[in-house]
């Protein structure tokens, strides 16, 4: 695989053509990043688990239909797939309520991860949701450490949700610090920078944990990159009317990582400011395209669509 992701895969219901109608749609940051890579012509796989129910089987089928290989396809009898329920306000804006049974996506175990698959990959990507459940935390740490020790690029996304962390931002921050020694590329958003002590603390954090680059997404303003003792901003790109922000960060990161792999960068020592700026521009276009279409997976752009706008 060019890219292996590890983490959640959830269900989202998006508004259909008729009033009150909803369309079942798959989502979740690691899945979206993997699918984004596949749409960029890369080979991608994801380590996750889903419930042995209609939704779980739908998720596995959605992965395969989008060119992503489920690397741990065993369905879990004792858990139900994570659901995201969506409601619309008077302006037809979406709001989310997450229902997590013993989340199957959080139950991945170390024994289900193949060292051989990690060894053959070019890059491994993880997210902080996997750190909340102890078995999955150990699996994530195992995966990231194996990738790092074998010279792969390790990418990690700090993504925080009140419901998942019971409102405890400090607990999320402490869990993330457990895996940072193996992370080369760290992604945060401007709304989550307090989880690493604020933007001013990022250079010290990089030095403490040996992180090569930190990317902070800034919404429509674009993204800021911390690299080699300095930081620079690549301005955002927008195309048409903003319809929905769901999946925009995933589209950005999927495009960013894909571009690095397209450029042939295989380890953190090969990263340069020029390559990072190239990847940031690519990611900004990918994220900008995503917010003009409804549904995270459906709106993830292809490599051809991004490159015609470069």
Image (cartoon, rainbow, N blue to C red):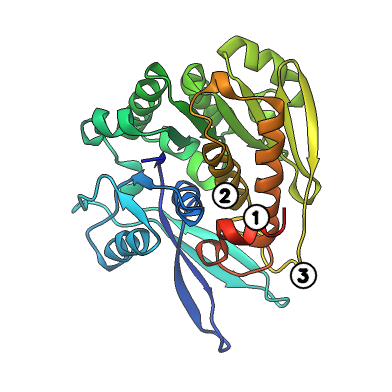
Q: Which residue is mark 3?
A: 241
Q: Is residue 37 above or below residue 6?
A: below
> Counting residues from the N terminus, which is met first, the one under dot 1 or under dot 3?
3
Do labels 2 and 1 touch, CB within 8 Å?
no
Relative image position of residue 182 (x, y in whole percent):
47, 19
Q: Is residue 283 above or below residue 276?
A: below
Q: Is residue 213 above or below residue 161?
A: above
Q: Secondary structure at mark 1?
A: helix
Q: How many marks?
A: 3
Label 1 Cα crowd, 10 Å radius (few <14 / some 14-19 / many 20+) = few
Choose mark 2 or mark 1, whichever is in front: 1
The foreground one among 293 and 105 is 293
Which residue shows up at 45% across the image and 36% down it? 126
The foreground one among 126 and 177 is 126
Label 2 Cα crowd, 10 Å radius (few <14 / some 14-19 / many 20+) = many
Left or right placement of residue 202 versus residue 147 in this view: right
Identify the mark at residue 250; answer none if there is no mark. 2
What's the distance in space between the residues labelled 2 and 1, CA to CA?
Answer: 18 Å
Identify the mark at residue 307; answer none if there is no mark. 1
Q: Quadrant of residue 272?
A: top right
What's the distance in space between the residues labelled 2 and 3, CA to CA?
Answer: 19 Å
What's the distance in space between the residues labelled 1 and 3, CA to CA?
Answer: 20 Å
Which residue shows up at 78% across the image and 51% down it? 220
The foreground one among 91 and 259 is 259
Do labels 2 and 3 touch, CB within 8 Å?
no
State the quadrant of the N terminus.
top left
Label 3 Cα crowd, 10 Å radius (few <14 / some 14-19 / many 20+) = few
Q: Residue furthest bottom?
A: 18
């Amino acid at each position: 695989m060019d890219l292996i992701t590890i983490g959640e895969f959830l269900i989202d219901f998006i508004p259909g053509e008729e009033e009150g109608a909803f369309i079942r749609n798959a989502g979740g940051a690691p899945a979206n990043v993997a699918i984004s890579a596949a749409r960029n012509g890369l080979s991608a796989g994801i380590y996750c688990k889903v419930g042995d129910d209609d939704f779980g089987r739908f998720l596995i089928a959605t992965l395969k239909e989008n060119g992503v290989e489920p690397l741990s396809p065993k369905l879990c009898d004792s858990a139900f797939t994570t659901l995201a329920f969506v409601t619309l306000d008077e302006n037809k804006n979406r709001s989310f309520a997450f229902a997590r049974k013993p989340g199957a996506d959080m139950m991945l175990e170390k024994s289900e991860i193949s060292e051989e698959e990690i060894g053959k990959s070019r890059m491994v990507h993880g997210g902080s949701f996997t750190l909340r459940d102890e078995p999955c935390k150990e699996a994530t740490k195992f995966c990231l450490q194996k990738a790092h020790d074998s010279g792969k690029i390790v990418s990690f996304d700090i993504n925080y949700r009140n419901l998942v962390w019971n409102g405890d931002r400090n607990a999320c921050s402490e869990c993330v610090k457990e895996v940072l020694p193996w992370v080369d590329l760290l992604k945060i958003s401007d709304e989550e920078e307090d989880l690493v002590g604020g933007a001013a603390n990022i250079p010290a954090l990089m030095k403490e944990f040996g992180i090569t680059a930190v990317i902070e997404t800034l919404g429509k303003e674009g993204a800021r990159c911390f690299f080699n003792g300095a930081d620079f901003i690549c301005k955002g790109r927008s195309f048409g009317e903003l319809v929905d922000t769901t999946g925009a960060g995933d589209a950005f990161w999927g495009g960013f990582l894909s571009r690095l792999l397209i450029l042939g960068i295989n380890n953190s020592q090969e990263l340069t400011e020029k390559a990072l700026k190239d990847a940031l521009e690519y990611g900004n276009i990918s994220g900008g395209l995503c917010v003009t279409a409804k549904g995270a997976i459906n709106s993830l752009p292809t490599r051809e669509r991004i490159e015609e706008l470069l």
